[in-house]
Amino acid sequence: MRCAFYPGCVSRGGCPELYPSAIKVAARLGLELEELTDVGCNGAGVLSREVSDPINARTLAKAERLGLSTVMTICSTCTGVMGQANIKLREDPVYRASMNHEFLADEGLEYQGTISVKHLLWILNEDYGLDRLRTAVKRPLRGLKVSPFYGCYIRRPDAIVEGKPQRKQYLERVIEALGAEVVDFGGKGKCCGFPILTANETNSMAMVAAHTGEAKGKGADCMVTPCPLCHLNLDGSQPRAEAQKGEKIDLPILHLPQLIGLGLGFSPEELHMRRHIVSTRAVAETVRLLT
Amino acid sequence: MQATFKVYRFDRETGGKPGFQSYALDLPEDATVLDGLFKIREEMDGSLGFRASCNRGLCGECTLRINRGGRLACITRIASVLTKDREVSVEPVRNVLVLKDLVYDVETLLWKKIKSVRPWLDPARPEPEREYVVPDEKLRPVRNAMKCYYCGLCDEGCSVIPFDKTFVGPAALTKAYRFVSDPRDGARAARLRALGEPRGIWDCVHCFEADEHCPRGIEPTQRIVDLRDAAVAAGIKSGTKNPQVARHYDSFAASVRKSGWLDEGRLALETWGVRRIFDLLPIAWRAFRRGKLPVPYRHPKRKGAERIARIFEKVQGKHS
């Protein structure tokens, strides 16, 4: 399967372990990625939509010009923000025409509304197939207890799941396909608090502590997330969240491609698992015992 | 259909310990949770207190927490929420003052917050002799927000309120949006300034829970994002007590405009300043030791960055 690849800013910025892990995993699985190198940040829900909509229209037009039908992302926020813009552009031809006319025409671009924006998680479940993933697994992650954490933008609003409510269970299905054990918990679909890290750090830290603490309390060895922004908060802010709550949590947070990579047989070092703020050593040791 | 209702019981007047009481019910397959509550009150326990009015999802009166999710009891079929043990838990929504069983003081859920956003029209000019004439299209967003019947489900579903009861919440912000969008209102800038202060629009995590909970299709989260976009377009990017929010927006936009993508190092420095960054040194040191912070730090311009800058210029041109 060939798709355009939109890696997002954070996979090479605040989470430099994500991009190389995703590239390795995609190559091992045989996903052919055509990386979009000359496109902009999608706005991440920060930039106002009058700026981010044309930037996203331009990205989608670039992918369309490559003759591809899917833009693959590795970030829930990229998926949601670009996906919501795409839904508006696809469903409202007048709006699309105005974006094309006002912003894209002078570059000789036009978005015709043929692209699907899909997270790697969705591609694995809907296009690649979990049976095929199962056969690619070289090291079943038996005994590893993993809590899923989605990130809001990949679950809501309703329009983003495009009539497929099962998208809200894909993470559990991938964890199981890799041979690991799902540790379900109430916070898996909630907000990680990252969007208000600047506006209200106290509330943001309370959310980190609540979700990581709940998963840990249910016996998770680690948490997996398809969103690097959630990762920045759940991993990067966990020590501050612990300090605010006055309680040690110490829950390693893995990126989705890292967990898949472990199942495919990559070593924790190859997946840059040392680059995390919360130590992933215990997960690495569990995985080493499996080989 | 057999179901066991576990209903929250408490009486503020007589005091005592709150708790859940179980009722075994036999109801038709298509019965709603409200049907179950009526059956309990009429046939089993006349002392049960709950609120209901239209019985068909038109009034927003019977907002409750059903199997730990905010729902209208009258349009929630029991079959759709029944657990494996055939149980249905029914309790008041969170963060409210409970008066009697399932009856709570709506002031504590909604009204206090709605009053805080000045929910009345502040005319832009002296009252005209005849009626205001407003084009239909300009009233469309106002009418959409006016569909709200104050059921409070958006606030019940809100991700922030369980952590911070002082957050003004999606219901009140939707009300604020209704006036900010009204072309007859003269206090738009003042409203946006007030909404930008802490506990207002910038404290929303835009998780879209409110949109999933709203039975009226108003999409309160999208309305909050609309308010933020309106504030940014008006140059009001924060309140006076949270200037870091404006610095964050400006730095984010400036780095994307300059290089095409987000410069997170610059964003942290410009948002927080050197002093705050100093506080974060222990984490930064840990990140550096683990190879998370690249040294030397570089943020090269991306190919096509000038095209992204051009988009910013065009949008800016629209406002000048």
Image: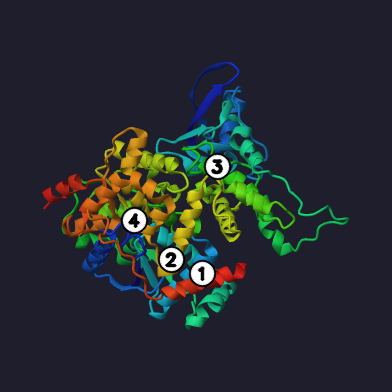
Q: Which residue is mark 1?
A: B312
Q: How far apart are the alpha carbons under marks 4 and 2?
A: 23 Å
Q: Is residue B274 above or below residue B161?
A: below
Specify the label residue B155 is tagged with.
3
- Mark 4–mark 2 contact, CB under 8 Å? no
- First along the sequence among labels 2 and 3: 3
Whether callout 4 and callout 3 share a subunit is answered no
Whether callout 2 and callout 3 share a subunit is answered yes
Subunit under mark 4: A
Q: Nearer the viewer, mark 2 or mark 3?
A: 2
Return the x and y of residue B273 as percentages of the image width and height: 41, 51
Q: On the picture, is B61 further left or further right than A52?
A: right
Indicate the secondary structure of the residue bearing disc 2: helix
> What's the amino acid at mark 1?
Phe
Specify the label residue B256 is tagged with.
2
Subunit under mark 2: B
Q: On the picture, is A270 further left or further right than B191?
A: left
- Spot the residue most to the bottom: A108
- Name the colouring of the figure: rainbow
Q: How far apart are the alpha carbons under marks 1 and 4?
A: 30 Å
Return the x and y of residue B159 as percentages of the image width and height: 47, 44
Q: Which residue is mark 4?
A: A226
Q: Nearer the viewer, mark 4 or mark 2?
A: 2
**Residue at left offset 38%, top offset 70%:** A71
Q: Quadrant of residue A186?
A: top left
